Image: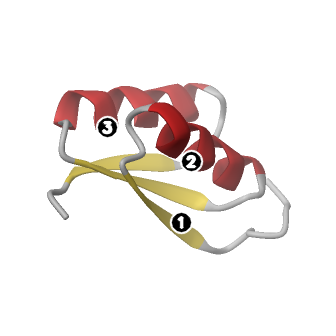
Amino acid sequence: MAGRLAGKVAIITGGGHGIGKAYALGMAREGAKVVIAEIDAVAAEAAAVDLRRQGFEAIAVRTDV
């Protein structure tokens, strides 16, 4: 997908819920590959699956920052 962030990787902390999840979607829409870094592994994976179902590249990583 072409966009301003094509070829870039966006690491979104807290990307499994709320604003972080919305931000991850925005980055993906701009062409970035997205890493959902979240303490809640289940929420992180759910967010990544949601992005992948929409055709974006995303992975989940359980992270405590």
Q: Quadrant of the C terminus?
A: bottom left
Lower sequence index among marks 1 and 2: 1
Give the residue pinned by disc 2.
24
> Mark 2 touching mark 3, by CB under 8 A?
no
The alpha-carbon separation of the residues under discs 2 and 3 comes to: 11 Å
Which residue is drawn at the image coordinates 38% and 48% (left, top)? 59
The numbered disc on residue 65 is none
**Mark 1: secondary structure:** strand
- Residue 19 position in % (x across, y down): 54, 40
Give the residue pinned by disc 1.
10
Which residue is drawn at the image coordinates 66% and 35% (left, top)? 55
Q: In the image as oriented, which residue stretches furthest toward the front? A: 19
* 2 with respect to 42 (left or right): right
- Residue 30 position in % (x across, y down): 77, 56
**Mark 3: secondary structure:** helix
The quarter of the displayed image where residue 13 is located:
bottom left
Q: In the image as oriented, which residue stretches furthest toward the bottom? A: 8
Amino acid beneath label 3: Ala
Amino acid beneath label 2: Ala
Q: In the image as oriented, which residue stretches furthest toward the right? A: 3
Mark 1 residue crowding within 10 angstroms, few (<14) / some (14–19) / many (20+):
some
Q: Nearer the viewer, residue 12 or 49?
A: 12
Number of marks: 3
The quarter of the displayed image where residue 44 is located:
top left
The alpha-carbon separation of the residues under discs 1 and 3 comes to: 14 Å
Which residue is drawn at the image coordinates 19% and 36% (left, top)? 40
Mark 3 residue crowding within 10 angstroms, few (<14) / some (14–19) / many (20+):
many
